[in-house]
Image (cartoon, rainbow, N blue to C red):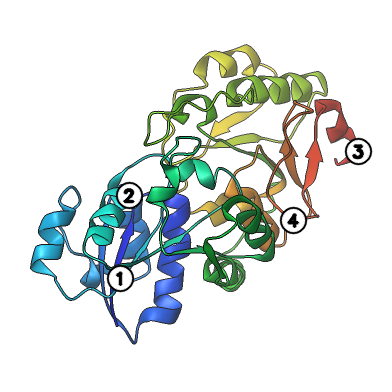
Amino acid sequence: MNILVVSYDAGGSEIISAYIKKKLLKNNYLCVVGGPAVNIFKKRGLDKNIIGGFNNNPKGFFEKYNKIDLILAGVGWVSDMSMNFLEEAKKRNIKTAVYLDHWVDYRERFGYPRIDWKKKLPDEIWVGDKAAFKIAKKQFLREKIRLVPNEFFKEIKLVYKKFVAQNKIENKHNILFLSEPISEGGINIFGDKDDSRRDEHYILDKLLAYFSDQKEKRAFIIRFHPSDRHHKYDAILSKYKNNLTILKSENSNLFVDISEADLIIGIETMALAVAVLCGKSKVVSFIPDESIVCPVPFKIIKKIKKVEDLAKIG
């Protein structure tokens, strides 16, 4: 089978590239990738299959590579590249599949609630776990949903175990905050704005105020999302810099920050799931809004609404 893989966003790229490395090596496949996906695919040794020069030209790609049987894509909020390739593939009667990451905004990635959003759906929708499968079944109803086990999650456990064995990990007992671009990214490829009341600036301020009042001695490390600007929180940090040790992580490897922290706090990022898979027991989702539930489906994650609840976790 000749397969075209198209990916851009970080979350979907991790899952799709891990799947390719594990399952597709016996197939003929090509990759058109952009943004964060480029380095993610390269780190898994998929360089030789990446085809450049077609990111904004799906028609040109299919004219040159006209024997594609299946397009497998990740669809996110940042780029319309995958959607453009899917639309062109449909015109050419090429089978289409989308591998969804995370557990939120499934229909919105295809333009819901626009009247014509269903026209953008692929032939198959893939999800990586039972929780995602249940959500997809509810949201898409008649579409073909496939449960394709998440090879990225399997990979995390093995790679982290090797990482710890090969590196001398200092027992630093840091607090790690996993940043998310909720307030800044919030517009999808169709121009729809996410009006969620969750705001990473407000949440970080609440956390720092709490730890400042507690006279916290542990270092508070901020790990930025790949699309974050590293100065985005400077106004907030200046309020607490005299009371807390606050550091901005420069580590390219998430495992470094996770391994050196004993308390990991985020909002609803996939990195919370990564921390759990790495064996961390104090993993917290802090969303100070009773109407919003963290969708990351790991029972070990403490999902709190009040910052004071951190006292029960330690």
Q: Position of residue 207 (x, y in %)?
A: 72, 26
Task: Kindly tell me whether residue 54 is visible in this rendering.
Answer: no
Q: Residue at x 48, y 29 (%)?
A: 186
Which label was assigned to residue 153? none
Q: Position of residue 81 (x, y in %)?
A: 28, 48
Task: Kindly tell me whether residue 267 is visible in this rendering.
Answer: yes
Look at mark 2 in the image and give the residue it sits on: 83
SS at mark 3 in the image = helix
Q: Residue at x 68, y 65 (%)?
A: 130
Q: Position of residue 13 (x, y in %)?
A: 41, 57
Q: Amino acid at mark 3?
A: Lys
Look at mark 3 in the image and give the residue it sits on: 312
Disc with the residue nearer the chain's start (2 vs 4): 2
Vertical placement of residue 276 versus 36, above or below: below
CA separation, marks 3 and 4? 19 Å
Which label was assigned to residue 298? 4
Question: Within 10 angstroms of label 2, few (less than 14), some, or many (20 or more) residues?
Answer: many
Q: Residue at x 43, y 43 (%)?
A: 117
Mark 1 or 2, which is nearer the eye?
Answer: 2
SS at mark 2 in the image = helix
CA separation, marks 3 and 2? 45 Å
CA separation, marks 2 and 4? 30 Å
Q: Residue at x 26, y 67 (%)?
A: 93
- Contact between marks 3 and 4 (CB within 8 A): the answer is no
CA separation, marks 1 and 4? 30 Å
